[in-house]
Image (spheres, rainbow, N blue to C red):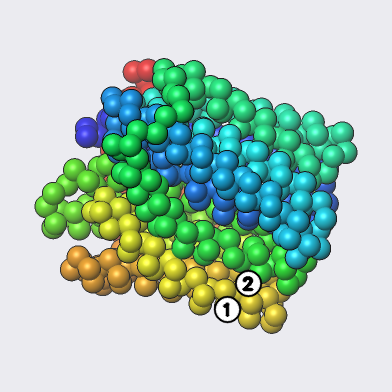
Amino acid sequence: MKSISLIKSGFWITYATFLTRFFALLSNLILARLLLPSDFGVIGIAYVFWSFFTLFTQGTAGSFIMCKGTEDKRYLNTAYTVSLCIGITFALAMIASSPAIANWFKEPNLTGLLIIFACNLVLSSIFYVYYGIMTRQMQYRELANINFLSCMTRLISTTGSALLGLGYWSFAIGDTASWVIGCIMTRYKSGHNLRLEINPEVRAEVISFCLGATGSSFGFYLNANMDNLVVGKLLGNASLGYYNLAYQITMSFSLIFNSVVNQLGMPVFAQISDEKQQEETLFRVVEEMSFIIAPIYALLFLIIDKPLIAFVFGSQWTPMSIVIPWLLIFAYFRVINSPLDSMLSAKGRPDLNARVNIYIAPIAVVAFIIGSQYGGILGVSIAVAFVLGIVWTTAWWWVGCRQFNWSLAKFFKITFQAIIFIVPSLFISSFFPFLLKPIVFSCVYILSLKLLLPKQFLKYQEITDKVVRWLKEK
């Protein structure tokens, strides 16, 4: 794929993901002023279970269509029908389990919230099929516009409901409105009118792919959500509200980068047949990403403190400031692991991803529980940084490098070189007033990069020039 095509595709994927995170952050900013931390805690619990059930709809039938193509109606209709059946089945499971979940967390209103989320699960099973069709057809621009409309709908619906005094129900109302818009628009823009039909010739192939995709996501779900469950159960809804909002803020950039890598990385990696070239490409992607995201997270570390949190969210949210530095460490390694995830999938070994995720899960849970008992939400965030940041990353890359004879030492050199490189800039900028810190840091970092790593500096300059030229041609 030509570099300009990658830039165009990456631009629209980044634009769509950025809009999602921006509107989510804007919604949280507004709702933080209107709702209590305990309200965020209740909806945070609901979202944990929502994330679990969407494992069976997101990235299953839609991903199958991305791989198979849109030419054969047998595959399209069968994937659509299977996805809808899965969505309805797990929606009923969510409804049936909602009273027990509400009783376990001692939050009666969780029952109603999870029932609404169950309806959204059916909508998501439809949406992801049409999303997969549009992605396969490379309709990135149309998807970005649909995403903008859905996000706007969610923001207006959620904020309006909160102003009417509906509390955490506002989140459920906004989400439902967003899914409805997404389903309608993707169905219209995809140009396909799918029908309920399971073709016996392709049924086994579709179901097998969906089960495999679900299995590879399950371990990651455990690691990404068990910290929230532990905080909610052991420390209460208010603590979960602080932790969950801090988590959303610190993971915003990682979700954007991961989205681009996941949607572009696997097809690009799959086209490389030479083993040595695969290794070189993988490490080059990791190196370039590390030098982009390390300074971004360093800037967030500098500017997100108690005064800024009090100004933006309100003084009641300042307790979350203690967990942000540790969550930023995890966010960095989460991005670094994304290219490896895509490469292993491109090589037909998503089972390696699942294996590492599942092995780490019990270790992570024990660490979260110990951290919560001795340090509250701070202890949990330290456990996240150490176990999910350093230990998980080491184990994941060790398994991949061992399987394909890649250099683990080279990976560590690349990863920690970017971290070490930002330390002088952080140290110098820490002596300046708050408003000058990001400016001083940026200047020192760019100057250091140009003087000490001129090749890396030129790479970013070339990419920037290509992006600027493309934007001017539009």
The residue to which callout 2 is attached is 380
Percent across and percent down for residue 393 are: 40, 68
Residue situated in front as seen by the camera: 459 or 227 = 227
Question: Image point 28% across, 66% down: which residue?
Answer: 400
Q: Quadrant of residue 12?
A: top left
- Asked if 335 appears above or below 178 in the picture, the reply is below
Can you name the residue that lies furthest to the right here?
165
Q: Quadrant of residue 120?
A: top right
Amino acid type shown at disc 2: Val
Residue situated in front as seen by the camera: 54 or 271 = 54
Relative side of 118 to 364, left or right:
right
Percent across and percent down for residue 285 are: 29, 51
Question: Image point 71% across, 45% down: which residue?
Answer: 115
Relative side of 13 to 106, left or right:
left
- Asked if 288 appears above or below 194 in the picture, the reply is below
At mark 1, the secondary structure is helix
At mark 2, the secondary structure is helix
Asked if residue 449 can be seen in this view, the reply is: no
